[in-house]
Every structure is written in C-alpha cells, then in structure tokens.
Amino acid sequence: AVVAGQEEKKQKRKREATLDDHNMALGLSNLLAISLIEKDINNELMQTWSYPGIEPNVEPLLLDRCTLLDKQLVPSTFSKLGNTWIYIFSVEMPKQSAEEEEAAPRPSVFKWVERFSVAVLAKEYHPELYLSLARVMAQAYALRGVPVVLLQMFLSVMTSSATRIPITDPEDPEPRYLSFSADEHDIRKCYLATSIKDLIQMFGLEIILVWTALMMKKRIAVYSDRVSVLLKVVRTLPLFVWHRRDWALLRPIV
C-alpha cells in the first residue's frame, strides 16, 4: 500500500509538470499589453506606441508613473490599477559625442528622444518576470529605434513564452542575442525577493503594530520619497502573513 501510494504521488507530480510545460508552451497568458513612452528634447512626454491597445484611463497613469520627467530617473517600477499590474522599465539615452556617433551611430529617433520607458501590463504579480521582459524590450528598442521590434517580441512571448533578438549579424561566427525566457523565472522566488529581517530592523519594536494590522486585515499606508525603498517595503509586507500567500492585496504606488 505504501509503494502504491508513493507511485501515485509520482504520477501526480509528473502530470502536474506536464501541465505546467503545456501551459508554458502556450505562452504568457497573463500578459495583456505593452506601451512605449518617450520624452523628447523639448521635455514633452507622450505615449508613442502601444499594442494591442491601452485603455484611455490607463495612459495618464503610465505617463505619471514612468518618472521620465523626474530629475532622478527610476529604472524600474511596478504598480497596480484595478486588477492590472503595471511594470515599467525606463532608459536614459546620454548624448553622444561626434566621435561616438561616427563609431556607433544610433537610430535617428534618438536625436530628439532623451528618455523612454517600456511598460508591460499583466494580470499577475511577478516583478522579476515582467520587469525582465520590459528590460529586454527596452534594450532592443534602444538598438533598433522602431516599435516593430517590440511587436515582434510581444507576439513571440505570447505564443512561446520566450523571445530572442539578434544584436549582431546572424551570419557572424559568434552572433550575440538579446533573449528572454519565462522558464528562467520561478514565481515562488519573487515572493522571497525581499527580506523580512530588513523590515524588522527598520521599524524596530513598532513592527508589532504592522504585524497586528496585517493579521487583522487592516489597510497600511507606506510613504517614502524614494520609489525603490517604497517598493521594497511594500512587497515585503505580505511575508508577515505568509499563510495567506496573497500579494494581490498590494497597491505599490498610488
């Protein structure tokens, strides 16, 4: 009976693994849309491209949270609107000298675009996965300068959960690629990406109040003048009620 029980468990794990592989092969089903936001040399900010489309109420929020107009650019942020998670990766394009431009010319769009952001909208909480995708997309756009490359990557990820864009001539003996694969990101690791010990050291004995509020399902407002610190603190809070495993309750930036 014991052997039979162990064999049944093995078969169950095998079926679950097969199902996971099948779901992964179908692509990132929780991916909703992507958006390209640019700031030009006249300090004007606008969404220049999106696919398959961004709701009218979402676009102003993307412009507000991309930090492109801030003095200090925040490379990556994540936030939430309703049930939609928003992951933004931002890039600053420093001015090139005449020598640099001659040696490695950039796409013409960056003659007037100083900063840009790639926003990825999804239905699930997984910062490491979607910020990695946004980062690779931003790198590809910085190299090509056309939204077509973003569309290509989006469709590839939607169908196969992976994408690869050559950054050198494919006929080179050792071609290089920008690549992304969802297989490299275990969602369980994103729950433990921050340390509960750091938060305890930050608040000291007053952490008891935080823990009590979370246990009683009360709302907690976190304020910080640094987005990176704010996100670190906010995503750590659900660890105090680990038994619930509920990160959907977070509203990182409001």
Image: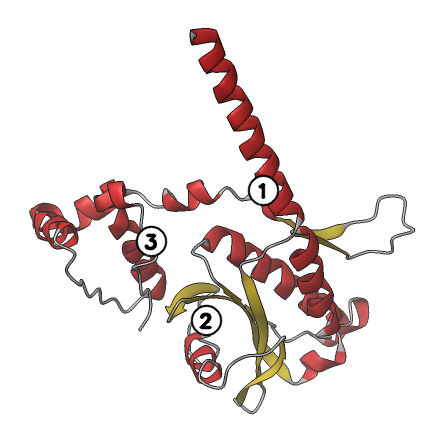
Label 2 secondary element = loop
Residue at image coords 58%, 42%? 184
Label 3 close to label 2 by CB (< 8 Å): no
Q: Nearer the viewer, residue 23 or 131?
A: 23
| Residue 57 vertical placement versus 153 (above, below) | below
Question: Which numbered mark, 1 or 2, is in the foreground of this view?
Answer: 1
The quarter of the picture where the C terminus appears is bottom left
Return the residue at label 2. Answer: 73
* Residue underneath mark 3: 247
Q: Circle 1 sits on which residue?
A: 184
Q: Amino acid at mark 2?
A: Leu
Which callout, 1 or 2, points at the residue further toward the start of the chain?
2
Q: Position of residue 134 (x, y in %)?
A: 57, 62
User: Could you tell me how far apart the alpha carbons at marks 1 and 3 are, in whole angstroms?
Assistant: 21 Å
Q: Earlier in the sequence, mark 1 or mark 3?
A: 1
Comparing 49 with 4, the one in front is 4
- Relative to residue 16, is residue 217 drawn left or right? left
Q: Earlier in the sequence, mark 3 or mark 2?
A: 2
Where on the picture, by quarter, is residue 148? bottom right
Give the amino acid at mark 1. Answer: Glu
Q: What residue do we see at 26% from left, 42% from top? A: 242
**Residue 185: x percent and y percent?**
54, 44
